[in-house]
Image (spheres, grey):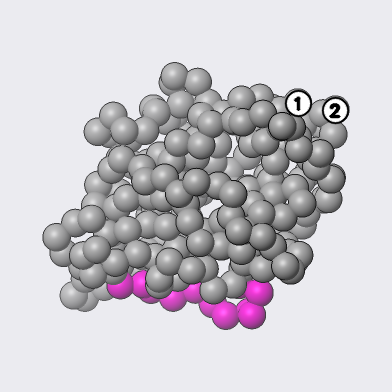
Amino acid sequence: MKRKLLYAPLMAVVVLTAGCSALSTPSVSAPGSSSAGAAPASTSPASSGTSPASASTSACESANLRASLGGGAGQGMSQDHAGLQLRNVGSSACTLYGYPGVSWVAGTDGHQVGAAAVRAPDASGAAEGTVTLAPGATASAPLDIVDAAAIPQAACKPVPVTGLRIYPPGERAALFIPLATRSGGYGECSATTKQPTLIVGYLQSGVQPGGGGAG
C-alpha cells in the first residue's frame, strides 16, 4: 500500500528523529564487483574517500569486499536510516578509510540517476579513522535513504531505480546492492533538487554505525 510521506527538507548534516522503528529495508548482499558482471556498467564513479597508505596492510579492493544493507536506526517518516556494510571476503587483512561513494542506478546499463550521496560527519564531531578488516570482518557507514515520493514532484520527477552503486574509498570498481523501486517507496529524482536523497557517513568498525546518520 502506498505510504503517505511527509516532505521534510534535509541539510547536508542531518539531525535525525529519535524513536525510529525497525529497519524495513531487507538486508541484501551484493556480488563482488562490477567488473565481474555483478553490478551494472558505470560511466562515472561516485565520490569516495582516500585511503591512506599503510606500512603493513594494504587498502581494501572492491574485488575483496561484499556490500549489504543492515543495522542503522530504522525507518523514519520519509526515510530509512540504514547501515551500509562492507565485509572483507578476501584471505588477507585490509584497510578502509573515509566515506564510500553511493548513488542510485537504473536501467539495464546501470546509469546513475540523481546526485551521489552527500557526506555527513559524525554527530559527535569525531573524525574518521583507518579501519583494519581481518578476513570476514565488517565495517559500516550510516546511510540515510530518502523516499523520492516525499519530495514534491515539481522539484523531483522521480524515476524507477534498480539499486545502489557503491564505491569503497579510493576504488574505481563498483559494488552493487539490488534495491528496486517499490510502490510508494524508493526512487530517485530526475530533476535537480536541493534536498539530498542519499546521505552517507564515514566507515567505522563493526556492523552498527556509531554516529553521523544514525538516530
Q: Is residue 72 visible?
A: yes
The quadrant the C terminus occupies is bottom right
Q: Main secondary structure of the magenta part?
A: loop
Q: Amino acid at mark 1?
A: Lys
Q: Residue 171, image x and y in percent?
A: 35, 50
Q: Residue at x 24, y 33 (%)?
A: 36
Res 161 quadrant in image: top right
Q: Judge the density around disc 2: few (<14), some (14-19), many (≥20) Cα neighbours within 10 Å.
A: few
The Cα atoms of the two marked residues, 1 and 2, are separated by: 6 Å
Q: Which residue is mark 2?
A: 154
Q: Residue at x 49, y 73 (%)?
A: 128
Q: Residue at x 26, y 73 (%)?
A: 54
The quadrant the N terminus occupies is top right
Q: Is residue 18 above or below residue 124?
A: above
Q: Is residue 161 above or below residue 103?
A: above
Q: Is residue 195 left or right of residue 109?
A: right
Q: Residue 209, image x and y in percent?
A: 52, 68
Q: Which residue is mark 1?
A: 157
Q: Is residue 113 left or right of residue 43?
A: right
Q: Residue 55, image x and y in percent?
A: 21, 75
Q: Is residue 50 left or right of residue 65?
A: right
Segment colored magenta: 119-132
Considering the numbered disc 2 on the image, is that residue within a helix, a strand or a loop? helix
Q: Residue at x 14, y 60 (%)?
A: 91
Q: Are marks 1 and 2 in contact (CB under 8 Å)?
A: yes
